[in-house]
């Protein structure tokens, strides 16, 4: 029963993340770099900070927690910087491979590396016992993402008849695959950052924090590292495009509107990791479900993103075969969530 509760909590957070791109369309008269930077302040600094506050207690402050193991904190932030690179290259992967193939390769790589590398670093044997179950679960996840990617490819073929999209004109398989693999590996660094902060999480618990919130200070450290990467890139875009003035030249009404929708996007995005940290607390320590939780989050992100795609009629105009393939891929991902709980 506790495992089911943990899965539900992670699912709620994943649904929030999958909904985070919806407010983007309500931001007015801001270039991409301005929206990205402002929502990043909410998503990677403010809300992670608020989420980390419950981990503090009368015996240890949040600042003391974050500096309780300086080496671990630096590792968390370092992995966060690398994760930030993954987020930036994710868009390029879709530019050169298309949305379906680009997302499939990137998210599949992210799910696999983010799950398997921490297990390997712990010295787990992936070819026997619980390690074999974990490896099988990741393989099922990859299969599901690949099937959904194929459905996306079929959708693109059907919807592009009569017109060529820019992503198709720039299609470059070798370059796109390399970038998508890079994006996936770098994005998986978020999971590695969480694993690197185990001592900080344990310190929070020993200081009296609830297990529900003990991981949140580690999440804050990783997102701070990611914010640094994105800050540098956005400042570069400001200098290149001269777009910084947009932040201060709009009417107060438009600025408030943009801030509110950036805040909404930020809290929805952060909810995936807030939910992950709470959901993990319901799994048994050193269990396969706990090790598989990163793949669970990635799988749910793919599922809910495609559900939103159906709701927003992004699959309109496709034939029955394409929808069947999409549903099959989502069913495989759902089975991957159940598989590891069967053992």
Image (spheres, rainbow, N blue to C red):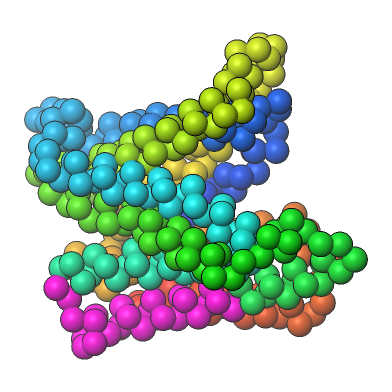
Q: In the rendered view, does 229 fall on the left or right side of 76?
A: right
Asked whether residue 275 appears in the rendered view, the answer is no
**At 76% from the left edge and 82% from the top edge, which residue is drawn?**
321
Q: In x, y percent, where is residue 224? A: 33, 36
Which residue is farthest right? 162
Number of numbered discs:
0
Give above or below for 47 relative to 160.
above
**At 70% from the left edge and 38% from the top edge, which residue is drawn?**
25
* Range covered by the magenta-colored residues: 123-148
Q: In the rendered view, does 120 fall on the left or right side of 182?
A: left
Where the N terminus falls, by quadrant? bottom left
Q: Nearer the viewer, residue 232 or 7?
A: 232
Give above or below for 123 relative to 166.
below
**At 18% from the left edge and 41% from the top edge, which residue is drawn?**
73
Q: Nearer the viewer, residue 310 or 117?
A: 117
The quarter holding residue 302 reads bottom right
Q: In x, y percent, where is residue 8? A: 44, 60
Q: In x, y percent, where is residue 286? A: 19, 68
**At 86% from the left edge and 62% from the top edge, which residue is drawn?**
163
């Amino acid at each position: 029963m506790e495992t089911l509760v943990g899965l539900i909590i992670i699912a709620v957070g994943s649904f929030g993340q999958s909904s985070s791109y919806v407010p983007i369309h309500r931001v007015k008269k801001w270039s991409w770099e301005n929206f990205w930077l402002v929502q990043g302040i909410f998503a990677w600094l403010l809300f992670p900070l608020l989420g980390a506050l419950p981990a503090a207690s009368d015996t240890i402050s949040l600042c003391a927690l974050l500096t309780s193991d300086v080496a671990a904190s630096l590792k968390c932030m370092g992995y966060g910087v690398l994760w930030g690179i993954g987020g930036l290259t994710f868009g390029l992967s879709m530019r050169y491979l298309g949305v379906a193939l680009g997302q499939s390769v990137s998210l599949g790589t992210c799910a696999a590396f983010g799950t398997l590398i921490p297990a390997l670093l712990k010295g787990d044997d992936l070819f026997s016992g619980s390690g074999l179950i974990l490896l099988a679960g990741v393989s099922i996840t990859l299969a599901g993402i690949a099937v959904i990617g194929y459905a996306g490819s079929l959708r693109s073929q059907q919807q592009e008849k009569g017109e060529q999209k820019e992503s198709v004109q720039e299609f470059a398989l070798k370059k796109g695959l390399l970038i998508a693999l890079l994006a996936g590996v770098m994005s998986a660094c978020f999971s590695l950052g969480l694993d690197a902060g185990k001592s900080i999480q344990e310190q929070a618990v020993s200081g009296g924090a609830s297990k529900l919130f003990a991981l949140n200070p580690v999440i804050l450290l990783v997102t701070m590292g990611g914010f640094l990467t994105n800050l540098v890139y956005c400042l570069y875009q400001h200098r290149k495009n001269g777009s910084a003035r947009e932040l201060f030249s709009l009417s107060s009404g438009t600025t408030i509107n943009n801030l509110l929708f950036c805040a909404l996007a930020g809290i929805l995005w952060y909810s995936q990791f807030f939910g992950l940290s709470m959901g993990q607390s319901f799994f048994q320590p050193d269990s396969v479900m706990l090790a598989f939780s990163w793949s669970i989050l990635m799988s749910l992100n793919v599922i809910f993103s495609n559900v939103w795609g159906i709701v927003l009629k992004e699959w309109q105009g496709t034939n029955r075969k394409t929808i069947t393939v999409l549903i099959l891929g989502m069913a495989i991902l759902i089975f991957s969530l159940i598989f590891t709980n069967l053992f």
